[in-house]
Image: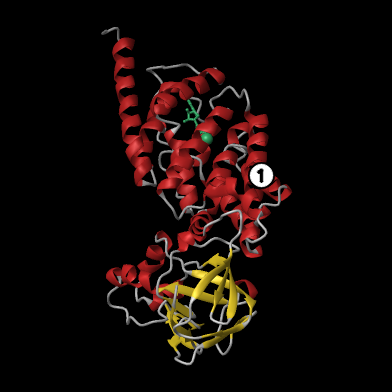
Amino acid sequence: MRVLSTNISSIKTIIIGKQEMQTGMYKKPIAEGIFLTKLGVKNDAVVDARYHGGAEKAAYLYGKNHYSFFKERFPDADWELGMFGENITLDELDESALNIGDVYTLGEAEVKISEPRLPCNKFGYRLGDPKAIKAFAESNYPGVYVQIIKEGKVNPGDLMKLKVSQPEKLSLTDLYRWFLKKSQHAHKAAELIANPHVTENIKEQFRKVLTKERILLEAEKYVREQLEGEGSGHDWWHIKRVLNLSEKMAKQYPDADLFVVKLGALLHDIGDHKFHDGDHTMGPKLVGEWLNDHSVDSESAEKVLEIVAEISFKGAKVATPMSSLEGEIVQDADRLDAIGAMGIARTFAYGGNKNREMHNPEHKVEDHENFEAYKKTTGPTINHFYEKLLLLKDRMNTEYGSELAKKRHQYMVTFLEEFFEEWEGKR
Ligand code: ADP
Ligand code: NI
């Protein structure tokens, strides 16, 4: 690998949306070379030390060979060397061949492979299109941050050569993929935390993932204990089905926070009004206590509480919007489990559990105006199809949920046709 260009910047003010920001992204080639120190590149501007700069990210290197990939997709940007905010543009960079902890000589300096760069909104701004952030995340071209093992000068034309390679290989691209989808790679956490060359910043993020996995296991245990053997169709297996379906749906919506979705699905029925004599304030109360006892971070806890408070069907004429994407997903999954074959089974289980008649032609269907009226109903089980279940397909939040609901809905319609034909003795 050879150095094509050495680049530094002064601070520039940009406006993203309505927000004024300062950035050190606009690096310009300087012919006289740069000096790498342990804490960064001499005379280079670093604005946000959380993301750039400091010992673990002292300098950023990028490959000229990746420019064309982005140039084709974002041709209107003012393309020049230093475009990616890199201090050093190399002629060729293959991130999959770089291993974390490997040491390279670079001009007079020695550098250690530290971390991949993460896409940020300033990068989107630099390329003139926020879509660039996603393209960067999906590419295998994150570029590389290095730590400085030996300080020294780097000039255009200098070579970068492998000096020490680590026995256990962890490629920069693997780390990049795992880090971008941390919660899906919880199983990699122990290995990364044990690796002495992985940076503290990355380890910390994976420790959080492990904490979340533990919380989910605790929640599962708690809910299972509470609802195991429940006889009205709100038992542990209902929760498990909603959890599985929510997880499947969440994978279709990459913006959804999988931890919130799973925790919301697990806890959604813990404080259901039916278990507490119609008191629907018990859900948020019990779940709030649980979240607090298990030190769930406040942002996730708030969203889970919102899900628990908002999820329930409250009557034919009562709208039940969800405040978050995660809530929309869990509500759809819960409602899918209330319709189709599963819905039919649960509804008769519920009616039996409450000693209700199965069907009574003299008992009219009601359209409930409010939650209180809906909760009080003691009508025959068949009425529940008309008072709730057949209304659900048009009240789904997500497109994916809506597709599944159509099929399940049709199954109930067919069942009801058969039911009444047989009731009348026509078949
Ligand atoms: P949500 O999940 O929206 O809070 P519920 O807990 O009221 O809704 O309902 C869950 C399931 O319990 C229903 O889909 C149905 O199978 C059963 N169920 C609830 N109320 C009745 C009822 N009055 N008659 C028959 N089944 C009921
Ligand atoms: Ni439920």
Q: Is mark 1 on a helix, strand or loop?
A: helix
Front residue (pair 323, 42): 42
Give the number of marks.
Answer: 1
Name the quarter where the C terminus is drawn.
Answer: top left
How far across and how far down the image is residue 269, in percent?
Answer: 58, 37
Direction bottom: furthest residue: 32
Q: From the top left corner, tell me how far across and down residue 329 is, in percent.
A: 45, 45
- Residue at 32% from the left image edge and 67% from the top image edge: 69
Q: Which of 29 and 77 is in front in this view?
A: 29
**Going 66% across and 50% down the picture, which residue do you hit?**
211
Residue neighbourhood size for the residue with mark 1, other residues' Cα within 10 Å, grouped as few (<14), some (14–19), many (≥20): few
Q: Position of residue 375 (x, y in %)?
A: 53, 34
Pointer 1 residue: 214
- The front one of 305 and 95 is 95
The spot of residue 410 in percent (x, y) is 30, 28
Q: Is residue 46 toward the left or the right of residue 215 in the image?
A: left
Q: In this view, does 245 lie above or below 350?
A: below
Is 76 located above or below residue 208 in the figure? below
Q: Residue at x 44, y 46 (%)?
A: 251
Whether ligand 2 has any atom under 8 Å from the Cβ at mark 1 is answered as no
At x 71%, y 52%, the residue is 295
Instruction: Kindly identify the amino acid type of the residue bearing the numbered disc 1.
Output: Arg
| Residue toward you, 332 or 375 | 332
